Image (tube, rainbow, N blue to C red):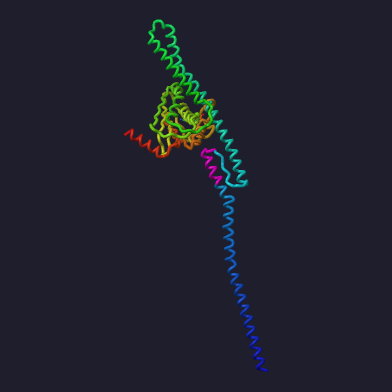
Amino acid sequence: MEADLRHYGALVVEDAANVSARENHLVLSWLDLMQRVPTYYLVFHFVLMLWMTRFLSNRFMRPLNHLVKQTKRIATGDFSAVKPMGKYRDEFTTVEVAINRMLRELESRQNSLIDSHKLRAVGILTAGVAHELNNPLNNIMLTAHAILEEHQELSAEETVAMVKDIVAETDRSRAIVHNLLDFTRETESTMEPLQLGRLVEETARLARNQVKVKRAILESFIAPDLPQIQGDRQQLKQAILNLILNALDAISEEGIIRVTVAPAAPGFLQVQIEDNGCGIPADALTHIFDPFFTTKPVGKGTGLGLSVVHGIVTKHGGRITADSVHGRTVFTVTLPCVTPVAACFDSAERKRDHRA
Ligand SMILES: Nc1ncnc2c1ncn2[C@@H]1O[C@H](COP(=O)(O)OP(=O)(O)O)[C@@H](O)[C@H]1O
Ligand SMILES: [Mg+2]
């Protein structure tokens, strides 16, 4: 009996030990699992975060970056339309469509501003052109009168020489009118390869009479063999003319305006318009390109000239800067060449060779 009791007691103890070991094991594995849960949790969150970042980046950041890039491009004066990024219409496409509508409006307003300013310049030039036409017309009239009154005494050779004079003077008048008409002509804005030197010479010729009336001197220095630039002839002429007319306003009688065309940084040409006029005070210098900023009396200045010039230059991928001290103002317009960079280097080298 005692032995049985001992035997069953031992069995109970053994079972209890087994149960205890099993429970222990269970508790330990639970504890182990509990320890790992935060790690799983973290890994899960990390993966979720990665996925969210990718999703947000695709959904918002990329289109936003695209918009930022496009607005930077627009700020440089390139008004071509923004190409939508997404395949489907979403909030970003709506913004892009709105920007494109604004761009069209902006371009048409800028063009009408340029046109209206051009008309103003034509108004100023017309007086000068009329003055310039006076000389050849006088010569024609005097020669024609001489032929009319003295034709009996004149030899055939003398008459022919006088008629040739009349033809030459008529050609000169036609060239003067043609130059102005060419500037006034309404043309579609077209970008074409241009010889910047020739364009600047033609523009300086347009202003020649205003210069004469003011008893000033207009000198031009055009470097030889310059590469071509890509541009709108009329608009570039207008920009250069505005700068020359400003210089004319700034100088007193017998002032000097110097126009230079030369290679600038590789791949760029520069036009400099320098005058020895009143100069621009430092506080005004930061505002001169703002629309409607003028120091001239009402009726004389509109304050739009330089903002139009700035618009035209940036549209051509160029830059305009102004430096001024009392008695010396220089506007520098830098424009990219069409021809490869090497060509600009070439011509700069050649120019140096010429000088050597
Ligand atoms: N060459 C220059 N010398 C001195 N001041 C200048 C010169 N060019 C421009 N300015 C200044 O910049 C201002 C703005 O020029 P602009 O935009 O052409 O307008 P506007 O000629 O109608 O005044 C002028 O009023 C003048 O004060
Ligand atoms: Mg002006």
Q: Is residue 326 visible?
A: no
- How many numbered discs sit on the rendered protein? 0
Q: Identify the main secondary structure in magenta.
A: helix
Quadrant in the rendering for residue 172: top left
Q: Going 42% across and 9% down the picture, which residue do you hit?
A: 147
Q: Going 54% across and 29% down the picture, which residue do you hit?
A: 115
Report x, y in % for residue 105.
Answer: 59, 35
* Relative height, residue 86 to residue 12 (above, below): above
On the rendered structure, is 61 left or right of 172? right
On the rendered structure, is 96 left or right of 341? right
On the rendered structure, is 134 left or right of 115? left
Q: Which residue is more in the foreground, 230 or 271?
A: 230
* Relative height, residue 232 to residue 46 (above, below): above
The image quadrant where one finds the N terminus is bottom right
Report x, y in % for residue 260.
Answer: 41, 31
Q: Residue furthest left?
A: 356
Q: Is residue 307 magenta?
A: no
Q: Residue furthest front?
A: 156
Q: Which residues are magenta?
A: 66-79
The image quadrant where one finds the C terminus is top left
Q: Residue furthest top?
A: 152
Q: Is residue 307 visible?
A: yes
Q: Going 66% across and 92% down the picture, which residue do you hit?
A: 4
Report x, y in % for residue 106.
Answer: 57, 36
Quadrant in the rendering for residue 299: top right
* Relative height, residue 155 to residue 115 (above, below): above
Q: Going 40% across and 12% down the picture, which residue do you hit?
A: 160
Report x, y in % for residue 294.
Answer: 52, 30
